[in-house]
């Protein structure tokens, strides 16, 4: 699609993002307290310090006999030693002295006076009250020392961390049952275009089904935010303006698709700009696909207007919404899977623009090769299905040469 | 922890998985019909063929004037041409002839007789009923041809595909409102260990909080399966046996943690083996950490017994449960993010075993370096928090040399 936006007026992606970040406060997200079981993949609001040592005691790592290691120094299968069995540990002052042992279960505190545990497999009960040991162990053998995992007071999890399975486990181990996390950012998704109809509509005759809301809602869920579906509006200035205005109250970030070029009915940018300060900050970004992208902010709510073409809308979400959402959460976004691959043919791009090229990566005799998909219009959604990767060509080069090795972002496994 | 399982009896990971796969039928998952909006990340049961061409018509990619390109061949700003404006398109037989044009909106079908569209920006209404064109365009300009995205009958999505945002969009574009997907595999998680207490328990005095269920439930959710929390059982043979037996009815895959080594109270493997055929298939895997892993299958339900140590349990889930779940779904599992990094010091490993080493990857002057975390016991959960990556050392080597470049699986972003 030819765009009427002049190259000279286009803003580079990094600059555009910087301008957007500069136009809003980032600390707008509310927090909520969740049981840790429900906090997976949510982002911590505060640092978490350990209230206890982990383990809380010097404890046994196995089922066996707690000993003073020095007592075992000469023990072997041919030279077993005998230790007196003391009865079960009853309290934390329980002590053994040289020549004594006591049975401990995995995870149980070891008694004072002991510094090692002999696995039950290396012991025998040869006479009542006496345990035969046929293995020599060093101090610390099969003992987990108090605090060896976590020290009391240690800042074990940091604010801005996205809680992973091991983090949830750590909270549990520290007996923390609930945790303060940011509410999921609400991403409003508003589609425009008089040519479109909703998937749920009963009258789709001669219309194109609106799919950007489906695609962007899934992308929103994928990065841990909450989609707020705001529907489909016709390209009518007053209606669109009103809809955007009322949408802003329900969301943290608004994404509008369609109506960003300069056709007769393309009022989106104008409508946004009329709603408050600072209004539209960037109109036209040096990105391919997606030149007509505009970025705006109205009363501290960021608005990202993306092309109505689904491929351009997806890439626009990836480039603009994803880092903005991470920034609001004070979080680093996840790296995507990447592979190094050689491109099968020269791919030209425009110096000054960042290009996103859909490629199909395949494994040829153990080497990855990336074939650009042939049909590349940003309306060709199937290109995102036939491809499994995205090649980003930076602004400062005019393309990638045949056989050049590049990093590819993989969005689907290599078959 | 020292394990009593003899090296000679340990089965290599790939062989162990093969034996597990061979012991069960893989086609056991039921399917369900979901609205496409709810089908993100779910796995398709059948191929999806396009019922329509996409686009359904030759359509305009812009707001502008549909023309026969040949009429514009000499047009330029200094030599504009005039075309007669025909009124709005009323039906699919609407036709223009040479010298005529008609206004079309983005996405609207272009009339018969036209093969290009001139963006409204390059036109002018100079007199009523006449449009001035000041640009020459080739056939196809700003036209999306019928079927250029998808051809009717084309198998556009394949069974076993995990539905991505673009796939959901494609289903919508094809006017498919609901889709058949596999039910999420139910992963039962049963924890054992008399030394443990539940996070929700009111009496945690002197006990260790059971966290494997928390960690594995999150990992289960992460790969798109459904955790079924079966609770915590003491190391008592009959009780454990009964609990496993009744659990099998509620799940597709059972994961049991704890009780897999050979201490006095380690009855898990014996209990599983007693429940049916073929019973325990593998006991002892050449994996570090996680040697006491056992794999079993009872009446076509796979049972994976993992170490009670949380790090070993996590790695066991990653190595055994994840590929098994993907296999049941007929799906390829997602690649994780990986980076190439140089290790900061030699890491020894045992030939014959596959080792999973936790490392912290950092960016030093634009180069990635991987530092193995110092505290490596498989009970040291904090090692999974201080690390951000996993280095897999294959069976056929005895370690990684200092400065050697290796692939690291990243499970948290590099800071």
Image (cartoon, coloured by chain):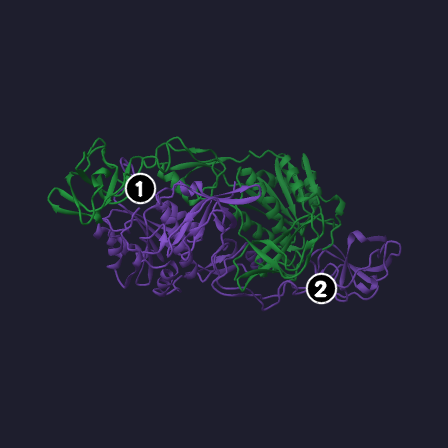
Chain colours: A green, B purple
Q: Which residue lies under the disc numbered 1?
A: B198
Residue B206 visible to the viewer: yes
Q: Quadrant of residue A270?
A: top right
Relative to residue A177, is residue A127 depicted above or below?
below
User: Which quadrant of the figure has residue B52?
Assistant: bottom right
Residue A301: x and y in percent read: 61, 37
Residue identifier under label 2: B91
Residues at marks 1 and 2 touching, judged by CB atoms closer than 8 Å: no
Q: Is residue A374 above or below residue A253?
A: below
- Residue at left offset 46%, top offset 49%: B401
Same chain assignment for discs 1 and 2: yes
How far from the left and from the top, in percent, is residue A350?
A: 72, 52
Classify residue B194 as left or right of residue A253: left
**Going from the N terminus, do you reach mark 1 or mark 2 first?**
2
**Secondary structure under the numbered disc 1 in the rendered image:** loop
Which residue reaches farthest left?
A: A128
Could you say where residue A233 lies in the image, as x and y percent from the top left?
64, 48
The reply to whether residue A259 is visible in this rendering is no
Q: Residue at x 36, y 65 (%)?
A: B22
Q: Nearer the viewer, residue A32 or A39?
A: A39
Tell which of B236 and B95 is nearer to you: B236
Drawn side of residue B298 relative to residue A343, left or right:
left
Q: Position of residue B46 (x, y in %)?
A: 49, 65
**What's the distance in space between the residues labelled 1 and 2, CA to CA?**
69 Å
| Marks 1, 2: nearer the viewer | 1
Which chain's residue wears label 2?
B
């Amino acid at each position: 699609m030819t765009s009427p936006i002049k190259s000279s007026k286009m803003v580079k992606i990094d600059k555009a993002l910087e301008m957007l970040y500069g136009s809003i406060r980032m600390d707008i997200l509310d927090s909520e307290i969740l049981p840790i079981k429900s906090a997976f993949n949510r982002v911590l609001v505060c640092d978490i310090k350990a209230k206890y040592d982990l383990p809380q005691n010097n404890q046994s790592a196995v089922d066996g006999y707690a000993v003073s290691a020095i007592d075992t120094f000469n023990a072997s299968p041919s030279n077993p030693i005998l230790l007196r069995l003391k009865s079960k540990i009853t309290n934390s002052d329980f002590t053994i002295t040289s020549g004594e042992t006591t049975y401990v279960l995995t995870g149980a505190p070891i008694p004072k006076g002991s510094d090692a545990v002999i696995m039950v497999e290396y012991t025998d009960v040869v006479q009542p009250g006496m345990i035969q040991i046929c293995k020599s162990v060093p101090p610390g053998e099969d003992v987990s020392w108090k605090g060896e995992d976590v020290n009391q007071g240690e800042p074990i999890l940091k604010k801005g961390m996205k809680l992973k399975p091991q983090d949830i486990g750590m909270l549990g181990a520290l007996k923390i049952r609930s945790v303060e996390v940011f509410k999921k950012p609400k991403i409003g998704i508003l589609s425009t275009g008089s040519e479109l109809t909703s998937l749920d509509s009963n009258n789709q005759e001669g219309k194109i089904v609106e799919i950007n809301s489906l695609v962007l809602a899934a992308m929103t869920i994928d990065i841990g935010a909450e989609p707020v579906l705001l529907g489909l509006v016709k390209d009518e200035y007053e209606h669109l303006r009103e809809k955007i205005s009322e949408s802003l109250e329900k969301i943290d970030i608004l994404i509008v698709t369609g109506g960003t070029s300069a056709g007769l009915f393309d009022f989106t940018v104008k409508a946004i700009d009329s709603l408050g300060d600072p209004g539209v900050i960037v109109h036209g970004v040096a990105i391919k696909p997606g030149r007509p992208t505009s970025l705006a902010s109205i009363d501290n709510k960021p608005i990202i207007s993306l092309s109505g073409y689904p491929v351009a809308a997806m890439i626009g979400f990836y480039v603009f919404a994803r880092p903005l959402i991470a920034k609001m959460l004070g979080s680093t976004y996840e790296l995507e899977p990447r592979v190094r691959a050689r491109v099968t043919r020269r791919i030209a791009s425009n110096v000054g623009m960042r290009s996103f090229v859909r490629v199909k990566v395949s494994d040829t005799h153990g080497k990855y090769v990336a074939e650009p998909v042939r049909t590349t219009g940003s309306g060709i959604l199937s290109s995102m299905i036939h491809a499994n990767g995205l090649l980003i060509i930076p602004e400062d080069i005019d393309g990638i040469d045949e056989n050049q090795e590049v990093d590819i972002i993989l969005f689907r496994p290599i078959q």
